[in-house]
Image (cartoon, rainbow, N blue to C red):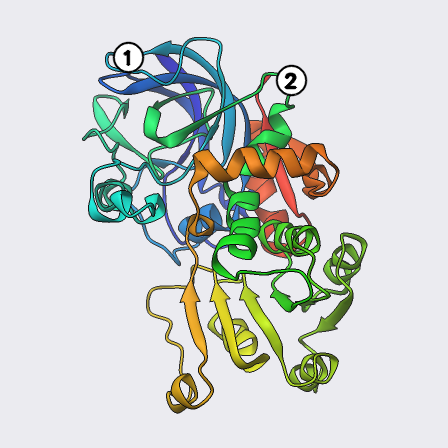
């Protein structure tokens, strides 16, 4: 079938993207679902820094590619062997397809699925190959989702079913911003009642983490960013303190607020300098968590002796170190209770044709979460 989609044609074009147009809007071909796959009519897709990092070249991928990994929609057709879904189901996309059989999947860590990672690295489906093409040539999928399009063929392993009364523009944010940010709080950082935590980087994922830390009962939640407007939003969403990392003495300010450092510092920037900041404000015996995706050439230098002498922990969090089928319903329940006001993250609704302008806003820090609405 023919679908309208946003296709990344060239990586590394300079901004403003409204002028250079790295993403073109046009018709491409979409193959229907194969074994274990479904056809989804996309209703909402979020703009994320992970997509921007492909556009600007920080994380090179195959092109041409349909970007988009944070989406929600309605299933229109199911392929052979699909057992979890039927037409009419409302679903959220997940950016790691989990096979259920590899070592990490068997250990309950689907975010680290080995066949899923291999497929994502090649821009293909976990079932092999692509379902997108143009003029007979392959068009690649971002993370097996490729939801900057009217419709997408997606593995059933990349979807979570949700109730039909949940607004799909809000539901879309659960697939990355909330799953990553709140997952880092609950799963990776082990934030518990009474502890102190710092959240470094206040985009959609970081602000989701601020809300989650409040829901988890953290005593002190220190929000850190370079933009005063982001700090003000974090304060409104539950941060007990805010620190501008661009100001002199910012590290000392965090340590003074927490009598030597936080129990868990979480970095959501994709910037190694910000990650080092997070490490420096973590107390003895504490954990530094990063969910950022810096350029693969970027390196982090830390005093190795502190890992032993201060029993420090430095760990990554991908997909919130979670199990999407378990965590997304939990986070939706917290949202329904008013404890995770995800709707506060949604600052712009845009059309697919406005996607390049949307990424300009994202890069400039002028938006938290923008969602493409298709219908």
- Counting residues from the start of the chain, the first of labels 1 and 2 encountered is 1
Front: mark 1 or 2? 2
The residue at the point 67 percent across, 83 percent down is 255
The residue under label 2 is 165
**Residue at the location (77% across, 68% down)?**
241
Residue 217 drawn at (x, y percent)? 69, 57
Number of labelled discs? Answer: 2
State left or right for residue 129 relative to residue 260.
left
> Relative to residue 123, is residue 72 drawn left or right?
right
Residue that badge 1 annotates = 79
Q: Position of residue 304 (x, y in %)?
A: 37, 87
| Secondary structure of the residue carrying numbered label 1 | loop
Q: Residue at position x 67%, y 75% from top?
A: 245
Image quadrant of residue 306?
bottom left
Q: Quadrant of the C terminus?
A: top right
Q: Is residue 15 visible?
A: no
Counting from the top left corner in percent of width and height, residue 335 is at: 68, 36
């Amino acid at each position: 079938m023919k679908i309208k989609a946003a296709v990344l044609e060239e990586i590394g074009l300079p901004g403003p993207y409204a002028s250079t147009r790295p993403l073109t809007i046009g018709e491409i071909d979409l193959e229907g679902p194969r074994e274990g796959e479904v056809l989804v009519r996309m209703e909402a897709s979020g703009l994320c820094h992970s997509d921007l990092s492909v556009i600007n070249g920080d994380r090179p991928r195959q092109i041409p590619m349909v970007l988009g990994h944070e989406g929600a929609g309605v299933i229109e057709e199911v392929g052979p062997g699909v057992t979890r879904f039927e037409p009419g189901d409302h679903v959220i996309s997940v950016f790691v397809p989990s096979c259920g059989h590899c070592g990490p999947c068997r250990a309950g860590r689907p975010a680290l699925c080995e066949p899923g990672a291999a497929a994502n690295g090649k821009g293909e489906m976990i079932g092999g190959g692509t379902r997108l093409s143009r003029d007979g040539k392959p068009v690649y999928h971002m993370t097996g989702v490729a939801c900057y399009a009217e419709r997408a063929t997606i593995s059933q392993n990349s979807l979570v079913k949700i109730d039909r009364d949940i607004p799909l523009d809000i539901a879309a944010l659960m697939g990355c911003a909330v799953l990553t940010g709140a997952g880092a709080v609950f799963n990776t950082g082990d934030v518990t009642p009474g502890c102190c935590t710092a959240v470094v980087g206040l985009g959609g994922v970081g602000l989701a983490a601020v809300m989650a830390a409040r829901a988890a009962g953290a005593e002190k939640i220190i929000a850190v960013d370079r933009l005063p407007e982001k700090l003000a939003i974090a304060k409104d969403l539950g941060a007990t303190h805010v620190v501008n990392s661009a100001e002199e003495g910012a590290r000392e300010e965090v340590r003074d607020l927490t009598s030597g450092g936080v129990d868990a510092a979480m970095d959501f920037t994709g910037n190694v300098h910000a990650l080092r900041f997070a490490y420096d404000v973590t107390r003895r015996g504490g954990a530094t968590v990063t969910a950022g995706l810096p350029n693969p050439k970027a390196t982090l230098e830390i005093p190795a002796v502190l890992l032993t002498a201060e029993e420090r922990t430095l760990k990554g969090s991908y997909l919130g170190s979670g199990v999407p089928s378990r965590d997304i319903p939990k986070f939706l329940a917290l949202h329904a209770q008013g404890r995770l006001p995800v709707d506060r993250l949604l600052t712009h609704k845009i059309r697919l044709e406005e996607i390049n302008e949307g990424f300009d806003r994202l890069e400039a820090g002028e938006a938290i979460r923008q969602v493409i609405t298709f219908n």
